[in-house]
Image (cartoon, rainbow, N blue to C red):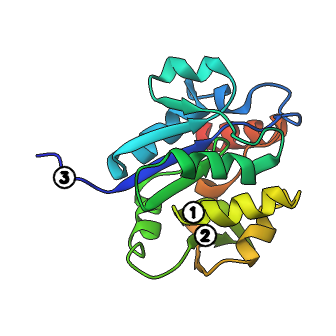
Amino acid sequence: MNIKKNITGIILAGGKSSRMRTEKGLVLLDGKPFVQLIIEALEPLVDELIIVSSNVVYDTFNIKRVEDIITDSGPIAGLHSGLTHSKTKNNLVLSCDVPLLRTSLLKKLIAHKEDDYDIIQFEAKGKTIPLIALYQKRCKEKCLELLNNDERRLRKLVSQLHVKTIPVLHEEYDQVRNMNTIKDLKEITNAIDH
């Protein structure tokens, strides 16, 4: 029996990946691309998946790929495009560089989906994580407003919306770590190997 979850998973894979020196979402961890690992974490929780990227290589994952409607404008543009193409009120939005994320942690965001917040995000070690968060589709209006004013900072968007922040437990911290550099990847690979 397929129960409708009324949630869309949106993976933002449109960044420049300059510090990783290669397309971040396609970097391998345990023989799987980051994006594949993120898809596996999202799939049990969502009805549809969307990858936001202009890179056609992501078509190999056989899920809907959309490009930024407003180009070269950072993560707010990716978020705007993903939310515009989403058919659901609730949207799990993830950057493509959190390959250790697990379904069980994402369920903590979904547990609050009936609360009246625009965004439900995680916080780890005193830093909020707006790219592992549950966004209401209505956030696309504020995204567009900021983009039209040449504002690209995601924190600016978050600061103007009704947000709930959920702390990540110490033992969950690795799940929300961004893999931005080759060094980050080596550290995680070494931790997994030991």
Query: The residue under label 1 is which amino acid type?
Result: Ala
Label 2 residue SS: strand
Which residue reaches farthest left?
Answer: 1
Q: Quadrant of the C terminus?
A: top right
Q: Earlier in the sequence, mark 1 or mark 3?
A: 3
* Nearer to us in this view, 154 or 127: 154
Q: Circle 3: is it few (<14), some (14-19), or many (20+) Cα within 10 Å? A: few
Coordinates of residue 18 in the picture (x, y in percent): 88, 34
Query: The residue under label 3 is which amino acid type?
Result: Ile
Q: Residue at x 10, y 46 (%)?
A: 1
Q: What mark, if any, has residue 122 been given in the picture?
A: 2
Q: Earlier in the sequence, mark 2 or mark 1?
A: 2
Label 1 residue SS: strand
Dot 1 corresponds to which residue? 133
Coordinates of residue 113 in the picture (x, y in percent): 41, 72
Q: Are marks 2 and 1 in contact (CB under 8 Å)?
A: yes
User: How many numbered tags mark residues here?
Assistant: 3
Q: Residue at x 69, y 38 (%)?
A: 68
Q: Residue at x 51, y 36 (%)?
A: 37
**Does residue 114 appear left or right of residue 145 in this picture?**
left
Q: Earlier in the sequence, mark 2 or mark 3?
A: 3
Dot 3 corresponds to which residue? 3
Q: Is residue 21 above or below residue 159?
A: above
Query: The residue under label 2 is which amino acid type?
Result: Phe
- In space, the residues marked 1 and 3 are separated at their CA atoms by 22 Å
Is residue 48 visible in the rendered image? The answer is: yes
- In space, the residues marked 2 and 3 are separated at their CA atoms by 26 Å
Coordinates of residue 165 in the picture (x, y in percent): 60, 78
Q: Residue at x 65, y 44 (%)?
A: 191
